[in-house]
Amino acid sequence: MTQVIATTPGLFPLPDWAKDELADLKGHQKTDLISGDESGEVVAAYDEAREEVISVQQDAGLDRVVEGQLRWDDMLAHPLAVHDSVETKGIVRYYDNNNFYREPVVQGALSADGGDVAADLGAAAADHVDSGLQAVLPGPYSLADLATDEHYGDDAAFLDAIADFLVEEVKSFPDVETLFLLEPSLVENAPEDGEDERAADAIDAVASAADAEVVAHTYWGAIEEKAYAHLMDADVDAIGFDLVANHDQTVYNVQEYGTKDDVALGVVDGQNTLVESPETIRDRIDWFEQQTNSTYDTVYATANTETFYLPVNKFEDKLRALANAADLEAAEA
């Protein structure tokens, strides 16, 4: 019998009050974005906003709770954007959408430098989440893809360094039940021959450092066949699929190469304000199981993408829909 776990890939929209307050505190220029050395007032505002989005998830009934990644001004590039060995330069487009991030240019060794992500996760865990805490990180291939290397001088060495950096971050985490590694670049900028195997090895290295269930979550389409076949070799507990953007190729990959005993399914559109009903979400999960002729141990029912694109009210409605879809499954079982 499949267990449906309602969750998200994180990167939430800021509460409306926090947008206004933080704009006043931080300023409105590129140089005013998060750098890791914020004032006490800025830290306090983010702490309050984090507590609020945790409460929203808990009130909605999600099975996994993230800290929200509200400080990630640079989206998935954030862990590098605040690193001491990285200089942020010009604004570049975030994949194929109307969002932009500061280009992180790696100019020195990516040694562990304090665990920025782990610190936020610890703040979430300390008083606000008794169980079901989920960590979110960019996957190593996507983080390397979003960055520019001016230190290592070799793509393979750079990817290894990114993976090692993320491994050290994971080792600093508090206890978490699940880790989502977000890997949209596996779809958006598919690795070439040889690089696809290295990408899977890098994901494997980060996953192996986690004392948690690990999901390698892909989105904005389906993974190319060869890259998917290599990803199957990574020691992750589940691979995440975007059923909103491309369900047919995704089903073909699973039919052809199989998948893990657990699966994450992007069954809610993280970029569209139309709110899916719990019944629609459940139908999408059932359809995937039927098409792949499998019953999975666990299905992580999630938004396909990050949700910072959404207005806060629509974001909250989608959280409730995900949680209610998981309850529907439990009631039917």
Image (cartoon, rainbow, N blue to C red):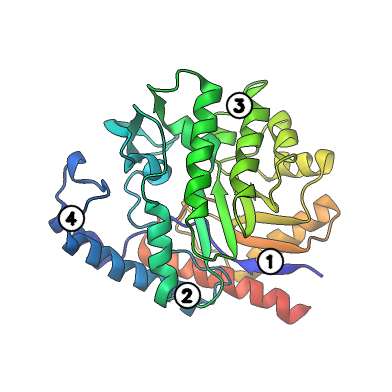
Can residue 318 be seen from the camera position used here?
yes
- Provide the residue designation for mark 3: 191
- Contact, mark 1 vs mark 2 (Cβ under 8 Å): no
Question: What's under tag 4, amino acid-wise?
Answer: Ala
Taking the spot 35% from the left edge, 50% from the top edge, the residue there is: 72
Dot 4 or dot 1, earlier in sequence: 4
Dot 2 or dot 4, earlier in sequence: 4
Secondary structure under tag 2 reads: loop
Q: Nearer the viewer, mark 2 or mark 4?
A: 2
- Provide the residue designation for mark 2: 129
- Contact, mark 4 vs mark 1 (Cβ under 8 Å): no
Question: What's under tag 1, amino acid-wise?
Answer: Arg
Q: Quadrant of the N terminus?
A: bottom right
Between the C-alphas of marks 3 and 2, the distance is 37 Å
Secondary structure under tag 1 reads: helix
Dot 1 or dot 3, earlier in sequence: 3
